[in-house]
Amino acid sequence: MGIKVMLSIGGATNTYSLSSADDARHVADYLWNNYLGGQSSFRPLGDAVLDGIDFDIELGQPHYAALARRLSEHSQQAPQCPFPDKLLNGALQTGLFDYVWVQFYNNPECEFTSNPENFKRRWNQWTSIPAKKLFVGLPAAKLPSPQTGYVPKQVTMSQVLPFVRGSYKYGGVMLWNRYLDVQSGYSSAIKAAV
């Protein structure tokens, strides 16, 4: 499938919001023209054209469906794991997302290490959304609290991946974050099993 370079928007702060559907469309136009396939005299990354937008919406309100629709209008080409996602369900149900990275960490009710059966149930629920591919989001290293949900590399290869690969919607693994991955060697260890 190759490497995809995405711009992540949102996060776990309370400093972002969309005030209306019109605001969402303006934000989508800005993202398209400055980071994706559009044109602008101000492109922060120069001539680089990113592959898409990662919706890391952990706080906010319901205008993300309008944002997703507008981005899709420009280009005909991730959420927490509790299902349905309380902030992004409307946007996800539009069928406009090709790839969805689902955060199966920092959510004890669906972390593999907390309860493998709950993890499997949540994964099966996520496969019902109208997206082409789903990615399992896992931490690349075990950190002190509050981050939870670390799955040891061997367990990921022997138990998690054999289960999720059974879905035709399985797209791969998303690791949080690259710095931790370089330190732990997580992606290198699981690459052959992905």
Image: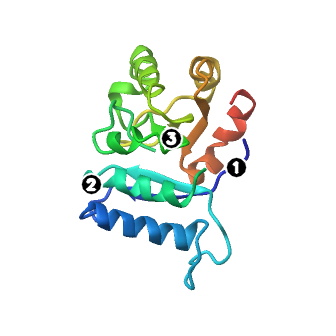
Q: Quadrant of the N terminus?
A: top right
Image point (27%, 54%), residue name: 60
| Residue highlighted by disc 3 | 100
Picture quadrant of residue 92 = top left
Q: Quadrant of the C terminus?
A: top right
Q: Earlier in the sequence, mark 1 or mark 2?
A: 1
- 184, 158: nearer the viewer: 158
Q: Are marks 3 and 1 in contact (CB under 8 Å)?
A: no
The three-letter code of the residue at mark 2 reads: Gly
- Estimate the x, y position of residue 77 in percent, counting from the top left: 61, 50
How far is the residue under mark 3 from the one under mark 1? 15 Å
Residue 34 to residue 81: above or below: below
Residue 74 to residue 175: above or below: below
- 169, 39: nearer the viewer: 39
10 Å neighbourhood of mark 1: few (<14), some, or many (≥20)? few
Say whether residue 135 is left or right of residue 29.
right
The three-letter code of the residue at mark 3 reads: Val
**Secondary structure under badge 2?**
loop
How far is the residue under mark 2 from the one under mark 3? 18 Å
Picture quadrant of residue 36 = bottom right
- Estimate the x, y position of residue 3 in percent, counting from the top left: 70, 49
Image point (73%, 46%), residue name: 2
| Residue highlighted by disc 1 | 3
Q: Are marks 1 and 2 in contact (CB under 8 Å)?
A: no
Total numbered badges shown on the rendered structure? 3
